[in-house]
Image (tube, rainbow, N blue to C red):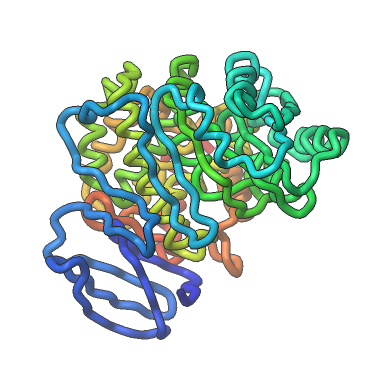
Amino acid sequence: MDTIPNSLCLSPASDLTLKSSAVRCFFPIRNRYSVNFRSSPTRIELNRNGFSGLSLRPMRGKSWARSAQIMDQSASKTDSSAPTIVEVDLGDRSYPIYIGSGLLDQPEILQRHVHGKRVLIVTNDTVGPLYLDKVAEALTVGNPNVSIESVILPDGEKYKDMDTLMKVFDKAIESRLDRRCTFVALGGGVIGDMCGYAAASFLRGVNFIQIPTTVMAQVDSSVGGKTGINHRLGKNLIGAFYQPQCVVVDTDTLNTLPERELASGFAEVIKYGLIRDAEFFEWQEKNMPSLMARDPAALAYAIKRSCENKAEVVSLDEKESGLRATLNLGHTFGHAIETGFGYGQWLHGEAVAVGTVMAVDMSYRLGWIDDTIVSRVLAILKQAKLPTAPPDSMTVEMFKSIMAVDKKVADGLLRLILLKGPLGNCVFTGDYDRKALDETLHSFCKS
């Protein structure tokens, strides 16, 4: 795909191939639908003629993210012992996402992805006492040749830094692990990001497995290979794209998740509906009470649907040249809150929720969406008990200075993910009226 520096406008599940800096083309897609492209050096717009709903198509080869039919009920009854599998199609680096209840009690799932005899489990002092022994047993039962090492890190976003990362390298080197070892990330997004970055860097790359234990990690951060740490000047500015061997989502681990962490994860679930899956958003509006009540079927369906959306986007744009950036709706504003207010003061999903409200507000000020979308976003975030305004200490100048070093800045231009058109459509663009951004910031900040 050609690099489009300033703007990308997408409808759900779109597959773009551009060969010219200024082109207009029209071609059929999936028999019943058609896509109309209009592009220029600074903007791409994609519209569907006759589009009436989401239909994720199979990708190349045998690995693809499967779509699911929206149901009024949370999910159909299935064999609880058999995991649902969503594939992330990246050619010879493709991998499965296993989703289900009791997966940590099925040792064959983990063991088939351990290639050597040495395993390092990276976890934290909250998750470790709950699941470290269970994971170690799953890796070794009937498999006595595998030896387990572990490193327990302090829990929290404020520890997602170079000093804490060095503890993983210290343990790996002291244990004399070799290139055939496997790192296992057992925890939420912080552990997954740090363990993945350690795996990408140790001996210039070793295998690793993701076992996410929070909603946030299960629906988003464990999938797609984004790894890294924070810098005092900005979130996730140091890291690498490095894909796991597999992701094992045991939904039973959510039973021990605090209420605040549970709600935080739903910010990412809501995101998928807003940017590319309107029917999923409508399902969430009906089922948020069930999700908040930890209904197993509702949670399993939300995780599966989210992973399908994430897997398809990653398969099309692994290293965020355009399409994948749309998954960051609300994150530019949200990361500014996390950095400015202090890492760990707010959970990531709480900051993203406010960032989403700000992005939606700006989209409305630009005239790109109608007020019904604004009200629906506020309503569903309130259902999920998520904040909708930044901390009082955040100022306009703080937002601007932190957002200026955001990863989506290109050639000094701040590009944002904004909604445009009907629900389920968004743009990734630097082509917007700066007055709208200023108005949004001033409306949410006291100074």
At 41% from the left edge and 56% from the top edge, which residue is drawn?
313
Residue 427 screen position, x and y as percent: 36, 60
103 shown above or below 377 = above
Count of numbered tags:
0
385 shown above or below 404 = above
Horizontal side, residue 288 vs residue 2: left or right: left
Q: Is residue 322 or residue 54 the one in the foreground?
A: 54
For the question of whether residue 199 can be seen, the reply is yes
Quarter-of-image position of residue 251: top left
At 21% from the left edge and 30% from the top edge, which residue is drawn?
76
Location of the C terminus (image quadrant): top right
Residue 247 screen position, x and y as percent: 51, 39
Residue 341 screen position, x and y as percent: 61, 32
Q: Is residue 198 or residue 208 the one in the foreground?
A: 208
For the question of whether residue 395 can be seen, the reply is no
At 43% from the left edge and 80% from the top edge, which residue is drawn?
41
Q: Is residue 62 or residue 352 the one in the foreground?
A: 62
Quarter-of-image position of residue 192: top right
Horizontal side, residue 341 vs residue 310: left or right: right
